[in-house]
Image: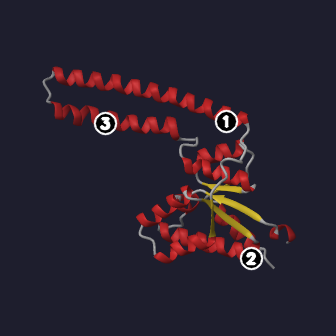
Amino acid sequence: MTKLREKQRFVLDTTALTSVELRETGEKLCEAIKRMLTLIAEARIKLNISCHIPFPTVYDELIQFMKRYDCDSELFVEVDTWLVKKTPNRFEVKIPAEVFYEYVKDMRERMSRGMKIAESSIWLSASEAINLTLKNVDRETIKRESTGYIIKDFRAKYRNALRYGTLDSAPDLDVLLLAKEMDAGVVASDEGIKKWAERLGLRFVEGASFPKMLEEYLKHIE
């Protein structure tokens, strides 16, 4: 029982509250966030577990999600009450040079893959346009039947090459920096955050597993 009451800290990414995997059958986004905050509040009071959110990056991202889905005003109050807003100390947190080197190398390789995808799409688009032009097809039809689907395919492949499995935004990085600063666990449903949290030696909890973990803790309170 003593171990359970020791201070535990977690830093939440937006996906820890908004991921589709987190929702129960038929549950809407605002309802899922409400359920999560209720668990977080109970864990805070009974188990001394605190949940933090990087401010303003991740906090603003979450608030925008909630506004988009027209969540009740009371839910915004609960966010401010139970999630501790904190800006990571970017000047003091130390990241090993090896991890930084790996990140730069990874991004360079991704950029190279993205360039090859772009080149392939340009060649395909040019070939399609030439073939249709030879058939006296008008420009608007060429755009609709050729260029349109090539651009759509390019965007999907380019996004996957450059963004999947890596840190691609300031909020993602802030989650790791704050967790590193506070020696806290990371909660997210994001492969990039997961990968680099592990490289930094941080505790990582899948977003969908976090509520189950809190429920399990709370079941064992005497």
Label 3 belongs to which residue? 149
Upstream in sequence: badge 1 or badge 3: 1
Upstream in sequence: badge 2 or badge 3: 2
Q: Which amino acid does label 2 sit on?
A: Lys
Q: Which amino acid does label 3 sit on?
A: Tyr
Label 1 belongs to which residue? 100
Q: Which residue is nearer to you in this view: 98 or 213? A: 98
Disc 3 packing (10 Å; few <14; some 14–19; many ≥20): few
Q: In this view, does 190 lie above or below 78?
A: above
Q: Which disc is residue 46 wearing? A: 2
Is residue 27 in sight in this rendering?
no
Q: Please give the name of the residue rendered at 70% of the width and 72% of the height, measured from the top-left corner.
A: 43
Callout in the foreground (1, 3)? 1
Q: Where is residue 205 in the image (x, y as percent from the top left)?
A: 68, 55
Q: Which residue is nearer to you in this view: 65 or 26? A: 65
Q: Position of residue 171 (x, y in %)?
A: 56, 51
- How far apart in space, not on screen, are marks 1 and 2 (Cα)? 39 Å
Mark 2 falls on what kind of element?
helix
Q: Quadrant of the N terminus?
A: bottom right
Q: Which residue is nearer to you in this view: 143 or 177? A: 177
Callout in the foreground (1, 2)? 1
Corner quadrant of residue 16: bottom right
Disc 2 packing (10 Å; few <14; some 14–19; many ≥20): some
- How far apart in space, not on screen, are marks 1 and 3 (Cα)? 37 Å
Upstream in sequence: badge 1 or badge 2: 2
Callout in the foreground (2, 3)? 2
Corner quadrant of residue 198: top right
Mark 3 falls on what kind of element?
helix
Q: Quadrant of the C terminus?
A: bottom right
